[in-house]
Image (cartoon, rainbow, N blue to C red):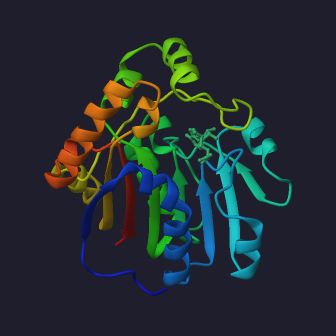
Amino acid sequence: MQPVTRERSIRYLPSETAWDGWSDFLQKTIVDNGSKVICDVGGGANPQLPLEFVEANGIDYTVLDISQSELDKAPAQYHKICADVAAKDFAFGEAKFDLIFSKMVAEHVKSARNFHTNIRNMLKPGGLSVHFFPTLYTLPFTVNRLIPESLSSAILNVVAPRNRYQFDKFPAYYDWCRGPTKRQINRLEGLGYEVVDYVGFYGHASYYRRIPPVRVLHNMKTAFLLRNPMPTFTSFAYLILRKV
Ligand SMILES: C[S@@+](CC[C@H](N)C(=O)[O-])C[C@H]1O[C@@H](n2cnc3c(N)ncnc32)[C@H](O)[C@@H]1O
């Protein structure tokens, strides 16, 4: 497997590019690295790799999720495994994956240490761990962590309504869900990873769409942070780790 680069890259971008760019970012990372054995951790109802991409690139693709009912919502053609990737006693057998990724899952695990340790154990030496997750201490996610689940669920229905069957809401803990702070990089490296690429995203334009004065202030804050990046205040992150 070819490494992406030996240099650590830390970048900051507006949050719209996180959502619009995720599929391309993931697929490019897979293709550039020649990754063939891939696991989508927490893929649940919505596996991130289309079957056409999997077939066209000769990929052995596993979708792993803690919830069988979420897995059942995904098309039957996917290879699915029901397991808790953050379990203390997680034993997945051999380290066979070239690349393991997650989208909007890291915030839902109670122990990020177990999550990243278990994923590392599933990877071949030099394998990549790729994640897209929301981060603290941006306001909406900080509030989500502090208030009861029933209240945050009701608020979500107002600010960002969605199809709850296919895109359910899960309790969020945000353990180690941070931007590229020194502390965050040190603890990931402490588990035996090299940080290859850490992208911090600023902003939440869609949440404030219906409240124009707040949206304007929010956009000013986002522009300021993009000019003067502070890793503590990112809203989302992409992270590429390499098992060393
Ligand atoms: C917000 S959904 C994201 C689903 C999909 N990745 C997406 O972006 O649409 C979070 C998923 O993580 C799964 N999940 C939460 N904790 C997990 C764990 N400890 N192990 C495996 N999956 C987990 C949930 O069951 C759910 O399917």
Residue 220 position in % (x across, y down): 23, 40
- The residue most toward the bottom is 2
Q: Determine if residue 149 is in view.
A: yes
Quarter that holds the C terminus: bottom left
Left or right: residue 168 compared with residue 203: right
The answer to whether residue 29 is above or below residue 183 is below
Q: Quadrant of ligand 1?
A: top right
Number of dots carrying numbers:
0
Residue at left 53%, top 41%? 87
Q: Is residue 211 placed above or below 176 in the rendered structure?
A: above
Q: Residue at x 55, y 81 (%)?
A: 31
Residue 93 appearing in the image: no
Please name the residue shown 34% across and 42% down the image: 203
Residue at the far left in the pictured view: 228
Residue at 69%, 29% (x, y): give it.
Answer: 164
Q: Is residue 227 left or right of residue 155?
A: left
Image location of residue 40, percent across then percent down: 61, 58
Query: Depth check: 244 or 77 in front?
Result: 77
- Which one is nearer the viewer's eye here, 173 or 188? 173
Query: Where 13 falls versus 52 (above or below)?
Result: above
Image location of residue 27, percent across then percent down:
56, 71
Where in the figure is residue 180, as x and y percent of width and height?
Answer: 24, 53
Which residue is more in the foreground, 163 or 214?
Answer: 214
The quadrant holding residue 94 is bottom right
